[in-house]
Image: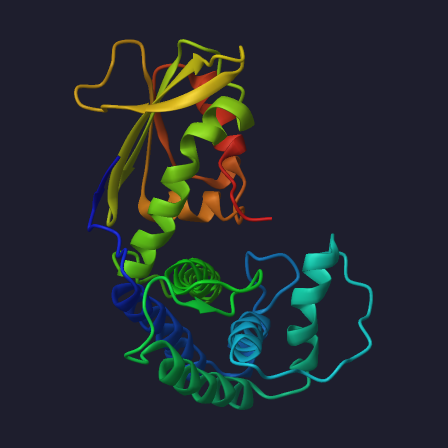
């Protein structure tokens, strides 16, 4: 897999990527009036205000704070227990002003930085993560991926595109690219012998080539192979960083995703249908 700029891999760089995207959420929130905050986003059921509340809620919880319990109304967009758990932090803050929620995020970010920039913290230190205690580097990768996704939700709702060439954007793209062999072989059900190339044209530039083969157990499995030169008969799907990340986040249907194909259109459609890593 080729990717430019390279993805941060060490804890210090991941922390800085996380800080940058979280600060972007704060800056966007500061510039919002009441009408902006009420704008629906591509994340089902959530407004701009809700997006900021979600980021606050997760980071506050990771820092050891507990939100008060509230009665949860029925919402169509809550589909499982994880969705209900995530929604509590949003519901708690629905009665607060945007300024209050943004101020809380500023305060929580300062607390997080005190924890995450501790000189004794290393890549392999165990800290609280969204799914339980985990390696510090893994937690920061997960949090950067999530916060940047919601930053883009906010930007899309407000019509303020940006931060598509950031280190956090690179984290998102590389995380999805690492899952492409599985998504193509299993999610899309591409037949053995076929080759699929995903070509992300920028601002983050990335390219990955996957061949589907039969493994020792007789099951189809995707394998990354060199993408240059493009293998004969490959299906190449080209799309921008923005189109790729919005589709991979499950925010836009394939019909609203701008892309081009060289090769088999039906295979491309199946790959794009399967190209969702958030649930």
Left or right: 119 as drawn, with respect to 93: left
- Residue at point 54% right, 85% down? 101
Q: Quadrant of residue 229?
A: top left
- Residue at point 35% right, 47% down? 173
Q: Quadrant of residue 163?
A: bottom left
The quadrant the N terminus occupies is: top left
* Residue 8 drawn above or below residue 94: above
Left or right: 31 as drawn, with respect to 53: left
Chosen colour scheme: rainbow
* Residue 71 drawn above or below residue 177: below
| Outermost residue to the left | 229
Left or right: 69 as drawn, with respect to 143: right
Q: Quadrant of residue 75?
A: bottom right
Measuring from the top left, give residue 277's x and y in whole percent. Answer: 51, 43
Nearest to the observer: residue 243 or residue 66: 66
- Residue at point 82% right, 76% down? 71
């Amino acid at each position: 897999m080729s990717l430019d700029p390279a993805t941060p891999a060490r804890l210090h760089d991941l922390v800085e990527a996380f800080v940058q995207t979280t600060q972007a959420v704060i800056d966007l929130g500061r510039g919002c009036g009441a009408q902006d905050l009420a704008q629906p986003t591509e994340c089902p059921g959530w407004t701009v205000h809700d997006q900021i509340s979600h980021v606050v809620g997760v980071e506050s919880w990771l820092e050891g704070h507990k939100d008060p319990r509230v009665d949860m109304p029925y919402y169509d967009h809550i589909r499982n227990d994880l969705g209900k758990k995530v929604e509590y932090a949003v519901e708690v803050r629905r009665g607060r002003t945007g300024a209050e929620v943004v101020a809380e995020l500023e305060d929580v970010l300062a607390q997080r930085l005190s924890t995450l920039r501790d000189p004794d913290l290393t890549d392999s230190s165990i800290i609280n993560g969204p799914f339980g205690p985990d390696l510090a580097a893994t937690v920061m990768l997960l949090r950067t991926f999530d916060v940047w996704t919601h930053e883009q939700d906010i930007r899309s709702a407000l019509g303020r595109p940006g931060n598509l060439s950031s280190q956090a954007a690179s984290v998102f793209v590389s995380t999805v690219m690492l899952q492409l062999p599985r998504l193509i072989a299993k999610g899309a059900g591409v037949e053995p012998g076929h080759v699929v190339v995903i070509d992300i044209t920028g601002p983050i530039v990335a390219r990955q080539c996957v061949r589907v083969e039969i493994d020792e157990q007789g099951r189809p499995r995707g394998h990354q192979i060199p993408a240059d030169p493009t293998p004969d008969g490959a299906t190449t799907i080209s799309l921008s960083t923005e189109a790729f990340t919005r589709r991979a986040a499950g925010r836009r249907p394939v019909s609203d995703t701008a892309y081009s194909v060289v090769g088999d259109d039906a295979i491309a459609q199946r790959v794009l249908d399967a190209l969702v890593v958030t649930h």
